[in-house]
Amino acid sequence: EVQLLESGGGLVQPGGSLRLSCAASGFNFRTYAMYWVRQAPGKGLEWVSSISSSGGNAYYADSVRGRFTISRDNSKNTLYLEMNSLRADDTAVYYCAKDAHSSGWFRDAFDIWGQGTMVTVSS
Amino acid sequence: EVVMTQSPATLSVSPGERATLSCRASQSINDNLAWYQQKPGQTPRLLIYGASTRATGIPARFSGSGSGTEFTLTISSLQSEDFAVYYCQQYGIWPPWTFGQGTKVEIK
């Protein structure tokens, strides 16, 4: 079964840091581009970051650029999101998702999503 | 940035009726458009990609159409499990990948 499992969320103070992980199973992780998408409480979906299959290309939303870093370890089938200088408006459920196309590039819709991990930024 | 605009914000429909949801892109994205369903407390689920292709396991009552800037998701006969929020998303011009604000389909 194709599965994504996020972890690492929690309560953090403004200005703090957190590292999210997304463990992939059931598919050839190293051949797919991956994404992070977040959803603030009661709000819609917001794309956060993307990374190609090799890890050589990454993109960020303006709201997180310079503070968040996406990375992956294909030997561990794991995607990461390092979050620094966290702000209250970063509070959200963070989902990882995979590209539907196995080209390794950003080709298609997001076909599999994890269950999400909640990040709360508050003092 | 491609802005995705969904309408209406809320759609009240009786079970068994047809629901039609709209999504407009601020510039042409060809057919690089997906629809997702999200139920309360659940993760988004891919319904449609390529504007009109149903994802694996999606019932035939869900259909998508459109190209360029105007897109439609139709649910031919609403079932109780279809009441949810639906998002469109473009993946043709990036970054950023952008979502619509969502349409909530509620029981009339």
Image (cartoon, helix red, strand yellow):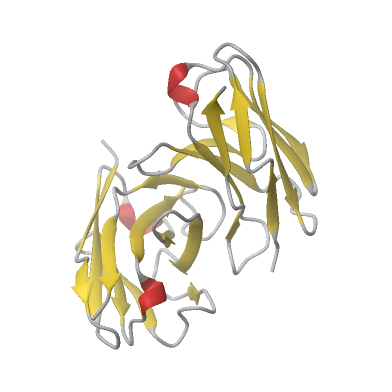
Is the C terminus of chain B in the top left, top right, bottom left or bottom right quadrant? top right
Is the N terminus of chain B in the top left, top right, bottom left or bottom right quadrant? bottom right
Q: Residue at x 63, y 43 (%)?
A: B9
Residue placed farthest to the front in the image? Answer: B108
Taking the image as shown, residue B74 lies to the left or right of residue A22, namely right
Taking the image as shown, residue A60 lies to the left or right of residue A115, namely right
Q: Residue at x 21, y 77 (%)?
A: A12
Along the viewing direction, whichever of B30 and A122 lies nearer the viewer: A122
Quarter location, residue B63: top right
Image coordinates of residue B31 in percent, x first then y, are 71, 44
Q: Is residue B105 above or below residue B108?
A: below
Q: Is residue A105 above or below residue B82?
A: below
Image coordinates of residue B58 in percent, x first then y, are 49, 25
Q: Residue at x 43, y 22 (%)?
A: B81
Q: Is residue B83 above or below residue A80?
A: above
Along the viewing direction, whichever of B37 and A87 lies nearer the viewer: A87
